[in-house]
Amino acid sequence: MSIKRSDDFHQMLQNIDSLPSLPQILEKIVALANDENSSIKDISNVISTDNSFAAKVLRMANSAYFGLPRHVSSLNQAVVILGVNTIKNIAIGLSVFSSLAKLDQKLIPELLRIWKFSLLVSGTARSIAKHSNYPDPEEAFLAGLLHDLGRIIILKFMSKEFKEINGLVAQHGYSLLDAEKEIIQITHTELGSYLIDSWNLPQRLKYVMQYHHTPYELDDVPCDDPSILLLVKIVSLSQFLCADTELSDADADVYNRLLKDLSINDSIMTLYMDEIEKIVDSLVDMMPFY
């Protein structure tokens, strides 16, 4: 299965001074997570090589977000209780945000907004995944957390254009993708997909990056694994539910179709999201990018 990219994609990348490289600690975490012979201790030892990072992983693991029955004081305990995949996903999410988010101080408020929105989407995706009997709700959590990576790239390298894009969406009713094409001729979905490839992160995430605004385009892409389409739909519905601006007509059509396909009652999800937002508020000041 291949993802189609704009003809302008590589030209756009050439205009970006330097995309971030994969952090060394993240390389090791991904490698261990993909190694059937790795142990809980191996994962904990890698994370523990950076005391500050380890503290952030442990803090998130202990948050109400994951609902541990008791406070845990060591990564080994957290891995045993939550599982290797959950700790791996927390570590990947925090590490990716940290590596992307070294910004001019005046851009930090916008980055905080993206961080909170990403947390809301990840929590909502996790809830919808459980509702939909998706086999790996923690994968949905990670996919939701990282779905807007491309927006951070635009903020980081094209802050002026980022504001212009937001203006078209807020003041003129553009969809986000149409506004990005109008201003920079490339979308955050394409940029996010590129980063997944560049960093050798799980390939399933690439389709979330590319199609979370247009999940039904995947109907025309040959795919041997139908769970990929379900994952994309879960994250797509989550980001529409959490949107803080009015949806364009095109996005609203997709949103309503997703509600039906995933058998989600809008009012019930609003109740879920109220709870998720309370939990997210306690995590916003974690600031993995500081």
Image: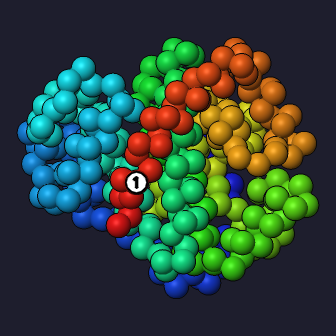
- Direction from residue 128 to residue 21 in the image, left or right: left
Point out the image quarter for the N terminus: top right
Q: Position of residue 205 (x, y in %)?
A: 50, 44
Q: Is residue 171 at least partly visible in the picture? A: yes
Q: Quadrant of residue 72?
A: top left
For this rendering, which residue is in front, 55 or 132? 55
Task: Look at mark 1 in the image and give the residue it sits on.
Answer: 285
Give the residue drawn at x 69%, y 79%. Answer: 160
Q: Is residue 231 left or right of residue 78?
A: right
Picture layout, residue 289 above or below residue 175: below
Q: Quadrant of residue 256?
A: top right
Q: Measuring from the top left, give residue 150's x and y in whole percent.
A: 58, 61
Is residue 50 placed above or below 134 in the rendered structure? below
Q: Residue at x 66, y 25 (%)?
A: 270
Residue depicted at x 55% and y 73%: 107
166 or 178, nearer to the observer: 166
Tell me where residue 251 appears, x and y as whole percent: 81, 42
What type is the residue that disc 1 sits on? Asp
Q: Is residue 109 above or below residue 237?
A: below
Q: Quadrant of the C terminus?
A: bottom left
Counting every numbered tag in the picture gives 1
- Secondary structure beneath label 1: helix
Which residue is at 72% across, 76% downward? 161
Asked whether, in this view, residue 213 is left or right of residue 169, the answer is left
Residue 141 visible somewhere in the drawing? no
- Occupied quadrant, residue 76: top left
Q: Position of residue 100 (x, y in %)?
A: 44, 67
Relative to 179, residue 273 above or below:
above
As rendered, which of 276 and 214 lies closer to the eye? 276
